[in-house]
Amino acid sequence: MSAAGSFKFAVFTASLPEWTPEEAAGKLAEQGWDGIEWRIVDQQPPTGASGFWQGNRCTWPLSTFEEDVPRIKEITEKAGLGIPSLGAYARCDEIEDVERLMRGAAALGVTQMRVPVGKPGPEGYNAAFAQRRKEYRRVAELAEQYGVKALIELHHQSLTSSASSAARFVEGFDPRHVGVIHDIGNMLQEGYEYDPWSLEILGEHLAHVHVKNAAPVATPVEGANRTDWKWGWAPMRHGVANLPKLFAALREHGYSGWVSVEDFSTEVPLEERVRDNLAYLKEISG
């Protein structure tokens, strides 16, 4: 099926922790989504309630990913869904895991996957940035070998929190093999740049789009006459990010690819939340 306008809409399964892969694929298809972005990472076995980052039932283990490819393909194809990208967590310095993921992605017929660059350690930002760029040269070679583009995500508290930092990171890399995921929800927390400019800055390296929303939360400091602020995830309709303006900028930029939702708000029950997110995207993207 086709989503509103020129965009195709998927859900990243990190945001579907309560559902099994079969349940997720079936429910997304029933609601009218175009695709599913599978989360791939080894995690501790569930010990209680399912959570986004621990005990997520809609996650495929990295350790068995290649063996699981036939089942993943069957579940996805049975639901009539596409796979815009793989939500993987193996960093560019974990090259054996990156290659394992790319082999599996190629077997699955997926043409791109996330390969994070991480955050700086004791060596500092500049040294980490230079080292990760060196490591990404090997990632780019694997991307060309397997036909699976490596994607760097704009993410707060990482080496590439803004479009400008990501553009500097991917400078010199072939956009056929290395791309960037635009993520306005992450950029709210760090790295936000005016939507049209951020897309222009990324240029040909813009390969995928994630959307979610967030809002600042006030926290009074005990014993002090001041307030601290932190960012909390918000429903798509009610956060700080102006998503209608983002879609207008995407259309103006000529982007007509996939948009994946990763909504980590919890005010609304999961099934209702996912259903309304698609309705909202259709409202603002046409």
Image (tube, rainbow, N blue to C red):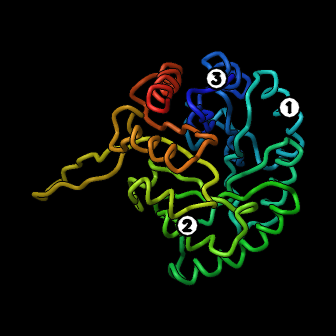
Q: Nearer the viewer, residue 127 or 207?
A: 207
Q: Secondary structure at mark 3?
A: helix
Give the labeled residue for mark 2: 166
Amino acid found under the numbered disc labelled 1: Arg
Q: Secondary structure at mark 2?
A: helix
Residue 123 image point, x, y percent = 54, 83
Q: Secondary structure at mark 1?
A: helix
Q: Nearer the viewer, residue 284 or 252?
A: 252
Residue 73 image point, x, y percent = 84, 33
User: Mark 3, residues whose alpha carbon is within 10 Å: few (<14), some, or many (≥20)?
Assistant: many
State whether residue 131 is above or below residue 60: below
Give the labeled residue for mark 1: 71
Please state if 93 lies on the left or on the right of 4 as rendered. Answer: right
Tell me if I can see residue 10 in this picture. no
Q: Earlier in the sequence, mark 3 or mark 2?
A: 3
User: Mark 2, residues whose alpha carbon is within 10 Å: few (<14), some, or many (≥20)?
Assistant: many
Q: Which mark is residue 28?
A: 3
Q: CA distance from mark 3 to mark 1?
A: 17 Å
Q: Which mark is residue 163?
A: none
Identify the residue at horizontal 59%, vertical 65% (top origin).
118
